Amino acid sequence: GTLVFDRCWAFREEGSTRKGAFEWIIPAAAKRVIPGCHERDLPRPGQPPKLPEEALAAELIGSGDWTWAGVPGFRFGATGVLTTPWGVGTWGLVPRHGNKVWANFAAQLHMLDLAPAQGRAAEGMGRFQSSRCSDGELVQGERIASKA
């Protein structure tokens, strides 16, 4: 039968509901599943993201510039538009995953785990670790301190 990509790194035989009727074709780099990458309610390409009116979204929208792997120019826009040095993308909150944000740019989906800046928790979110959904590559990002 035909194998169909189903969720994160799992394949199922099309039209089959039998247990054990699976053939696994998993590249070495894709052996782990990254929480959030398989969420069915994430926007798909061509769909605009819907930002819920939540404190995390509001905080990121007003947070200014961030770095991505030390490169500045990363910004969370109010309508789900993501500005990056590699072009425009989209972003949104991952449902049911706390401080996790998805970012889609340069034809890649990433999951960003946000955390307060070290020693500056009162200032809100100030850093993230990104996991690229296609291969699990990890990248660090930081909020650029505003000049007072």
Image (cartoon, rainbow, N blue to C red):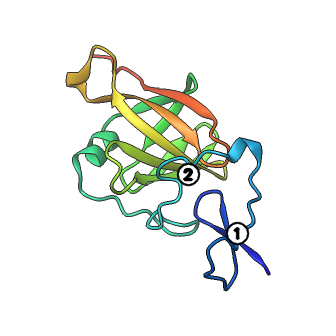
Which corner quadrant of the image does residue 113 belong to? top left
| Element under disc 2 | strand
The C terminus: image quadrant: top left
Closer-to-camera residue (139/66) = 139
Q: Which residue is found at the position 74% from the left and 60% from the top?
A: 24
User: Which class describes the residues within 10 Å of circle 1: few (<14), some (14-19), or many (20+)?
Assistant: some
Left or right of 119: which side holds 131?
A: right
Q: Which residue corresponds to the image point at 34% horizontal and 21% vertical from the top-left?
A: 117
Q: Amino acid at mark 1?
A: Phe
Q: Position of residue 86 (x, y in %)?
A: 64, 40
x then y, percent, for residue 116: 31, 26
Name the residue rendered at 77%, 58% in the picture. 25
- Taking the view exactly as shown, the residue that stands out farthest to the bottom is 15
Q: Nearer the viewer, residue 27 or 101?
A: 27
Q: Tell me which amino acid carries mark 2.
A: Asn
The answer to whether 78 appears left or right of 68 in the picture is left
Give the residue drawn at x 28%, y 44%: 56
Distance from the alpha carbon under mark 2 to that under mark 1: 30 Å
Give the mark toward the camera: 2 or 1.
1
Residue 104 tag number: 2
Looking at the image, which residue sits at the far right? Answer: 1
* Of 1 and 144, the residue lying toward us: 1
Residue 49: % across, % down? 43, 62
Dot 1 falls on a residue whose secondary structure is loop
Image quarter in which the N terminus is found: bottom right
Front one among 47 and 38:
38
Which residue is identified by label 1? 22
> Position of 49 compared to 12: left or right?
left
